[in-house]
Image (spheres, helix red, strand yellow):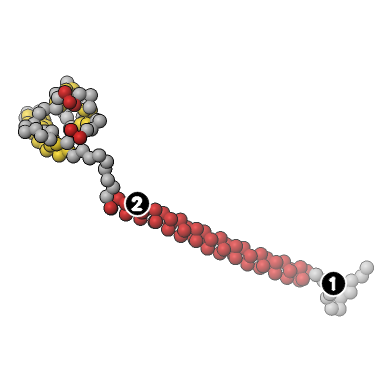
Amino acid sequence: MPKGESEFIPIYTYDENGGTIEHESFMDRLDWKGSKRSSDIQDGSIYVLNVTFNDTGTYHCHFFRKLIYDHYEFDTVVSKLVHLSVVAKASRGTASIVSEVMMYVSIIGLQVWLLIEMIYCYRKIAAAGEEALREAANAEYLAIASESKDNCAGVQVGE
Protein backbone atom coordinates (compact mmCIF):
# COMPACT_ATOMS: atom_id res chain seq x y z
CA MET A 1 0.00 0.00 0.00
CA PRO A 2 1.83 3.12 -1.15
CA LYS A 3 1.77 6.17 1.07
CA GLY A 4 -1.60 7.88 0.85
CA GLU A 5 -3.48 4.75 -0.29
CA SER A 6 -6.18 3.22 1.88
CA GLU A 7 -6.07 -0.36 0.61
CA PHE A 8 -3.55 -2.80 -0.79
CA ILE A 9 -3.11 -3.00 -4.55
CA PRO A 10 -1.62 -6.15 -6.13
CA ILE A 11 1.70 -5.35 -7.79
CA TYR A 12 3.19 -8.78 -8.63
CA THR A 13 2.01 -12.37 -8.99
CA TYR A 14 4.21 -15.43 -9.40
CA ASP A 15 3.18 -19.00 -10.11
CA GLU A 16 4.74 -22.03 -11.76
CA ASN A 17 4.31 -20.34 -15.15
CA GLY A 18 6.35 -17.28 -14.17
CA GLY A 19 5.83 -13.80 -12.82
CA THR A 20 3.40 -11.07 -13.82
CA ILE A 21 3.65 -7.39 -12.89
CA GLU A 22 0.13 -6.31 -11.93
CA HIS A 23 0.61 -2.55 -11.37
CA GLU A 24 1.73 -0.14 -14.09
CA SER A 25 3.94 1.96 -11.79
CA PHE A 26 6.17 -1.11 -11.25
CA MET A 27 6.53 -2.07 -14.93
CA ASP A 28 10.18 -2.95 -15.73
CA ARG A 29 11.14 -2.23 -12.10
CA LEU A 30 10.43 -5.58 -10.40
CA ASP A 31 12.77 -8.54 -10.69
CA TRP A 32 11.97 -12.02 -9.35
CA LYS A 33 14.98 -13.45 -7.47
CA GLY A 34 13.18 -16.34 -5.80
CA SER A 35 12.95 -20.03 -6.70
CA LYS A 36 13.08 -20.47 -10.46
CA ARG A 37 11.96 -23.28 -12.76
CA SER A 38 10.16 -25.08 -9.97
CA SER A 39 6.59 -25.57 -8.88
CA ASP A 40 7.90 -25.80 -5.30
CA ILE A 41 8.61 -22.17 -4.44
CA GLN A 42 10.82 -21.95 -1.38
CA ASP A 43 12.25 -18.45 -1.89
CA GLY A 44 10.02 -15.53 -2.78
CA SER A 45 12.51 -12.66 -3.18
CA ILE A 46 11.56 -9.67 -5.30
CA TYR A 47 13.95 -6.81 -6.10
CA VAL A 48 12.55 -3.34 -6.67
CA LEU A 49 14.74 -1.49 -9.16
CA ASN A 50 15.05 2.29 -9.55
CA VAL A 51 13.38 2.97 -6.21
CA THR A 52 11.68 6.37 -5.86
CA PHE A 53 10.20 8.25 -2.93
CA ASN A 54 6.75 7.22 -4.19
CA ASP A 55 7.62 3.59 -3.35
CA THR A 56 7.59 4.38 0.38
CA GLY A 57 4.83 2.47 2.12
CA THR A 58 3.69 -0.88 3.47
CA TYR A 59 3.66 -3.93 1.25
CA HIS A 60 1.70 -7.10 1.99
CA CYS A 61 3.21 -10.36 0.70
CA HIS A 62 1.02 -13.47 0.43
CA PHE A 63 2.64 -16.84 -0.16
CA PHE A 64 0.36 -19.74 -1.04
CA ARG A 65 2.16 -23.05 -1.11
CA LYS A 66 0.80 -26.55 -1.65
CA LEU A 67 2.98 -29.36 -0.31
CA ILE A 68 2.18 -32.61 -2.10
CA TYR A 69 3.04 -35.91 -0.44
CA ASP A 70 2.29 -39.47 -1.57
CA HIS A 71 -1.06 -39.70 0.25
CA TYR A 72 -1.60 -36.17 1.48
CA GLU A 73 -1.68 -32.55 0.33
CA PHE A 74 -1.00 -29.68 2.69
CA ASP A 75 -1.88 -26.07 1.90
CA THR A 76 0.08 -23.40 3.67
CA VAL A 77 -0.41 -19.64 3.61
CA VAL A 78 2.15 -17.16 4.88
CA SER A 79 1.49 -13.42 5.00
CA LYS A 80 4.14 -10.82 5.73
CA LEU A 81 4.05 -7.05 5.99
CA VAL A 82 7.06 -5.18 4.62
CA HIS A 83 7.51 -1.52 5.61
CA LEU A 84 9.62 0.33 3.04
CA SER A 85 11.06 3.77 3.75
CA VAL A 86 12.96 5.47 0.95
CA VAL A 87 15.53 8.06 2.08
CA ALA A 88 17.65 10.43 0.01
CA LYS A 89 20.95 8.98 1.18
CA ALA A 90 21.63 6.36 3.78
CA SER A 91 23.53 7.82 6.72
CA ARG A 92 26.26 5.89 8.47
CA GLY A 93 25.58 5.01 12.05
CA THR A 94 27.94 5.73 14.90
CA ALA A 95 28.70 2.03 15.34
CA SER A 96 29.77 1.78 11.70
CA ILE A 97 32.19 4.69 12.03
CA VAL A 98 33.65 3.43 15.33
CA SER A 99 34.11 -0.10 13.97
CA GLU A 100 35.90 1.22 10.88
CA VAL A 101 38.26 3.35 13.00
CA MET A 102 38.95 0.39 15.32
CA MET A 103 39.66 -1.80 12.30
CA TYR A 104 42.31 0.62 11.02
CA VAL A 105 43.82 1.06 14.50
CA SER A 106 44.08 -2.71 14.97
CA ILE A 107 45.64 -3.17 11.50
CA ILE A 108 48.26 -0.50 12.19
CA GLY A 109 48.88 -1.88 15.69
CA LEU A 110 49.41 -5.40 14.37
CA GLN A 111 51.79 -4.14 11.68
CA VAL A 112 53.87 -2.24 14.27
CA TRP A 113 53.96 -5.33 16.51
CA LEU A 114 55.06 -7.47 13.55
CA LEU A 115 57.83 -4.97 12.70
CA ILE A 116 59.08 -4.99 16.30
CA GLU A 117 59.07 -8.80 16.34
CA MET A 118 61.00 -8.92 13.07
CA ILE A 119 63.66 -6.51 14.40
CA TYR A 120 63.93 -8.50 17.64
CA CYS A 121 64.33 -11.81 15.78
CA TYR A 122 66.85 -10.29 13.34
CA ARG A 123 68.99 -8.97 16.21
CA LYS A 124 68.79 -12.30 18.02
CA ILE A 125 69.82 -14.24 14.90
CA ALA A 126 72.62 -11.74 14.15
CA ALA A 127 73.95 -12.01 17.73
CA ALA A 128 73.87 -15.81 17.56
CA GLY A 129 75.71 -15.68 14.23
CA GLU A 130 78.43 -13.41 15.63
CA GLU A 131 78.83 -15.68 18.66
CA ALA A 132 79.15 -18.71 16.38
CA LEU A 133 81.80 -16.90 14.31
CA ARG A 134 83.78 -16.04 17.46
CA GLU A 135 83.60 -19.64 18.67
CA ALA A 136 84.67 -20.93 15.25
CA ALA A 137 87.61 -18.49 15.14
CA ASN A 138 88.76 -19.55 18.62
CA ALA A 139 88.48 -23.24 17.75
CA GLU A 140 90.51 -22.71 14.56
CA TYR A 141 93.19 -20.83 16.45
CA LEU A 142 93.46 -23.57 19.05
CA ALA A 143 93.61 -26.24 16.38
CA ILE A 144 96.39 -24.47 14.55
CA ALA A 145 98.34 -23.88 17.77
CA SER A 146 98.15 -27.54 18.80
CA GLU A 147 99.29 -28.76 15.37
CA SER A 148 102.28 -26.44 15.26
CA LYS A 149 105.49 -28.25 16.37
CA ASP A 150 108.03 -25.54 15.65
CA ASN A 151 108.34 -24.40 19.22
CA CYS A 152 108.40 -27.74 21.01
CA ALA A 153 111.04 -27.82 23.75
CA GLY A 154 113.86 -30.35 23.31
CA VAL A 155 112.95 -31.26 19.77
CA GLN A 156 115.11 -29.98 17.01
CA VAL A 157 114.09 -30.12 13.46
CA GLY A 158 116.80 -31.14 11.05
CA GLU A 159 117.11 -29.45 7.78
Q: Residue at x 70, y 69 (%)?
A: 138
**Residue at the disc numbered 2:** 100
Q: In this view, does 57 lie to the left or right of 103?
A: left
Of labels 2 and 1, the one closer to you:
2
Residue at the right extreme?
A: 159
Q: Say which element carries label 1.
A: loop
Q: Position of residue 96 (x, y in %)?
A: 30, 50
Whole-percent x and y of residue 50? 25, 30
Circle 1 sits on which residue?
Answer: 150
Image quadrant where residue 49 sits: top left
Q: How many marks overall? A: 2
Nearer to me, 111 or 144: 111
Q: Residue at x 73, y 70 (%)?
A: 142
**Amino acid at circle 1:** Asp
In this rendering, position of residue 54 left or right of residue 143 = left
Rendered-image quadrant of the N terminus: top left
